[in-house]
Image (cartoon, helix red, strand yellow):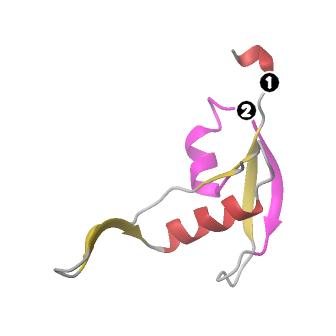
């Protein structure tokens, strides 16, 4: 299982009709997170730039580089969480 994490503002709430109502989140941040997840290899955690900026002082990461994601005009810089047994 691969994981994609992105941070930013989203719209959250109950969306639907009287017949079917779901609590969901919408926005570009969610779309980028989904694209990162689809790019992640098994046991890999990919971070978007805002998430990396928030955690870089506490979590060991390496830059993967800019990649083109579906629905984005410009490449997005992505980062990988580096996991080691010594962390536990």
The structure residue drawn at horizontal position 79% and vertical position 18%, both measured from the top left corner, is 85
Pick the front one: 41 or 62: 41
The residue pinned by badge 2 equals 60
Q: CA distance from mark 1 to mark 2?
A: 9 Å
- Dividing the picture into quadrants, the one containing residue 86 is top right
The structure residue drawn at horizontal position 80% and vertical position 69%, both measured from the top left corner, is 67
- x and y, in percent, of residue 81 in the image: 73, 40
| Number of numbered discs on residues | 2
**Could you tell whether 64 is left or right of 5 in the image?**
right
Q: For residue 67: magenta?
A: yes
Q: Secondary structure at mark 1?
A: loop
- x and y, in percent, of residue 3 in the image: 66, 50
The residue pinned by badge 1 equals 84
Q: Quadrant of the C terminus?
A: top right
**Could you tell whether 17 is left or right of 72 in the image?**
left
Pick the front one: 55 or 21: 21
- x and y, in percent, of residue 65 in the image: 83, 59
Q: Is residue 48 above or below residue 88?
A: below
The structure residue drawn at horizontal position 59% and vertical position 38%, both measured from the top left corner, is 55
Q: Is residue 54 above or below residue 22?
A: above
The range drawn in magenta is 47-68
**Could you tell whether 3 is left or right of 13 in the image?**
right
- Dividing the picture into quadrants, the one containing residue 10 is bottom left
Q: Residues within 10 Å of mark 2 (few under 14, many from 20)?
A: some
Pick the front one: 14 or 32: 14
- x and y, in percent, of residue 44 in the image: 76, 45
Q: Secondary structure at mark 2?
A: loop
Determine if residue 11 is in view: no
């Amino acid at each position: 299982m691969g994981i994609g994490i992105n941070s930013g503002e989203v719209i959250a709430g109950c969306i639907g009709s009287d017949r079917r109502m779901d609590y969901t989140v919408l926005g570009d941040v969610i779309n980028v997170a989904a694209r990162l997840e689809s790019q992640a290899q098994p046991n890999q955690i990919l971070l978007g730039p805002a998430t990396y900026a928030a955690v870089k002082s506490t979590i060991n990461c390496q830059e993967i580089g800019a990649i083109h994601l579906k629905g984005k005009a410009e490449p997005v810089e992505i980062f990988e969480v580096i996991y080691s047994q010594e962390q536990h």
